[in-house]
Image (spheres, coloured by chain):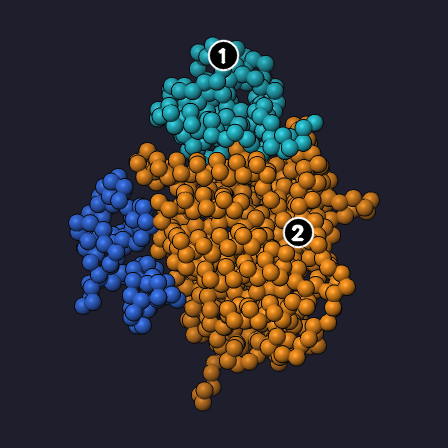
Amino acid sequence: MKILTGNDLRSGAVVWWDGSGWSLHVEQAADVGSDGDVIAAREVAARTVVSPYVIDGEATSAGVRPAHIKERIRALGPTVRLDLSLKPADPAAGDWVI
Amino acid sequence: MAEVQFRFRDDEPVADPAVTVDSFAAQSNAAAVRLEPGDDAALLIPHLERLRLVEVAFPVWTDGRGYSSARTLREAGYTGELRAVGDVLIDQLGQMRRCGFDSFAPEHELDADDAAASFARWDNVYQATGDGRKPIWALRHPA
Amino acid sequence: MYKYDSYDQQMVDTRVAEFRDQTRRRLEGHLTEDQFRPLRLMNGLYLQLHAYMLRVAVPYGTLSSAQMRMLGDIADKYDRGYGHFTTRQNIQYNWIKLEDAPDILADLASVEMHAIQTSGNCIRNISSDQYAGAAADELVDPRPYAELLRQWSSFHPEFLALPRKFKIAVIASETDRAAMLLHDIGIRIVRNDAGEIGAAFYVGGGMGRTPMIAPLIRDFVPLDQLITYAEACLRVYNRHGRRDNKYKARIKILVHELGKAEYTRQVEAEFAHLLSQDIEPPLAELARIKAQFADPAYETGLADEIDLANPAFARWVASNTHAHKAPGYAIAVVSLKPVGGIPGDASADQIRLMADLARDYSFDELRVTHAQNIVYAHVRKADLFALWQKLDAAGLATANLDQIGDIIACPGLDYCSLANARSIPVAQKISERFAANGKAEDIGELKLKISGCINACGHHHAGHIGILGVDRKGTENYQLLLGGSEGADCSLGTITGPGFGEDGIVDAVEKATDVYLARRESGERFLDTYRRIGMQPFKEAIYAKESVDG
């Protein structure tokens, strides 16, 4: 599947297109099919997001998983500071990235 | 041809079309020339007396060769109109002025208030660039 | 250190107002991201892997305790409680919001700090020797020259749209503690045969994809022509540096492609012309700046001996202090590389503590080193024990300066969208391995540097041991290099062979150090043994097939 990620323009937070808006959680990323660039352009013009780009993802039982380690780190947070990640209470959160 | 939106000169604007650097030397009555980023401004130095307008093209403002071209011409004694043309944006107006540009023809019209603010932004400057402004080091150590 | 006068203060205040206006226009849609990006970069604001990242300038690595305290407060107020000290003597915050950035710049301006030109295709922070003003081997303090160049380069209207970034380093000793030869311009202040002081210019060094050592372009520029010569070097680059290919746009490529002789000829011609243009500040300006770098009021008659009864303290003195030019004083280095820690990171509380300790023990001044540590340049030997105790209580007294545990690492794929691999976990594992095997002190000086991608922000080409992270079909992989050096004996590391996974690279590093320990001759550092025996013995050990039994 193709998913769309970017950063919130104002806050810089990593966001994922969930089909109708931008979510902080990659699990909610929607399959944008071939519409990624169109959605990206529209959202950039609306000044919600900055530097969006389309990546490959796979649907798993735990939700969407980006195909490349870089976006998995983007989704979770720095693997060396899991206390700052989106899942600070989960000591195994880093395992999902590797 | 883009309109000149800002001009800091009292004389009449030159109506001649600006010719390329290559054809300028061959046309002895040409008074207006256009410099592309890769052109050598020094080629114009022997002809400064007949030059009344030099347009410096900025296809994209991040190609800063035009800043050096402008200074080279002013340092050689050129006193005619020096016009920045093309990707001329609000935030580069002040620095263009400092490099010696005295007229500006942005390809997209600029907000006049934002432009005025940009030109007037800096009360003082750190460097001497031949624009007549005294740099801070000169103010610190009046001769 | 330098203190702003009203002109300097007005410049940073104006810059804050300008950036506040630019940010407003971006958020209101008057500027596209393509138009805004270069503007925010020139205020140190990157869009990074997790958020906006702000790189604050620490000019030539020197800051006051008040400034350091503000850096700690910014970490708490606007970020997530910590900062990262970089390989160019700056500090970075990783979790910044664009809408806060103008306020952060305003807070910085209130303590004479800024983020001006810490990114973008312009002249960046000018770096210098972290022992400036304290080391016995310097000719003069290099920092006044760095300050003169800082002001010259700030908002220089001709050089705000260069082909690429531009990094300058200034030193004033034969020992190069600032990796001067690996900069776009490296300047060494020297004395000529007539006893005059001037500047030697090295132009065209750099790391990244195509590392190069800067050749000497001019061996002596008189001090009253320093700015004019720098301007000539920059103008030739601005005019002729490549703009067709981002990976060939640094001045090192121009100098390499023109050849040193032709580049020098063009600079000398431009220099001769610029001498007639009155762009040089008067020597009175350099004198004005120098007066602010006068020696602190050293006490005299101080004890020169240090009581080394405490073994942990003794180890720290042996590794982390350096001789000072004034009797009774020492230079003390705070390691930001605790065992298993993140190299260069410090919490807001640690930053504020370091600020307080500077106020109490080092004439109110700190330095950031390009090895991502902090220096107290002027500590009374009698105060070292008290200083060490307070550092130790805060986890800042790791006794590993220039040892294998003193790792230089870029943020890598954990933080940086340019990276191909994570660098910090590798640093952590190596640090833990050598803490466990107890070999670090015996190995002695070993500068290990890790980059997470070819941009080489971790300076891996200049590591005695260098590690480069690469992406091998979606998996992180690490190349090992040996024999780099950043000093006056500058050399670029050589790759050993095929790369390794995260665990394999740690084993490979240990095998390399074992070869050194087995083969070294008296007095040799790792680098010296490598240079003597060559790559082959290391390669054999690193790639030897394991025996069946283990």
**Could you tell me if residue C351 is visible in this image?**
yes
Q: Residue pushed farthest bottom?
A: C549
Q: Vertical placement of A36 versus C371: above or below?
A: above
In the image, what residue type sits under mark 1? Asp
Residue shown at 59% from the left, 50% from the top: C60
Q: Vertical placement of A68 versus C191: above or below?
A: below
User: Color used for chain A?
Assistant: blue
According to the picture, the residue beneath numbered tag 2 turns out to be C171
Q: Is residue A29 left or right of residue C331?
A: left
Q: Which chain is cyan?
A: B
Residue C163, given in percent of the width and then of the height, sits at 50, 40
Q: Residue pushed farthest left?
A: A20
Mark 2 — on which chain does it sit? C
Q: Vertical placement of C328 versus C208: above or below?
A: below
Residue C175, given in percent of the width and then of the height, sits at 69, 58
Local crowd size for mark 2, using a 10 Å CA cut-off: few (<14), some (14–19), many (≥20) = many
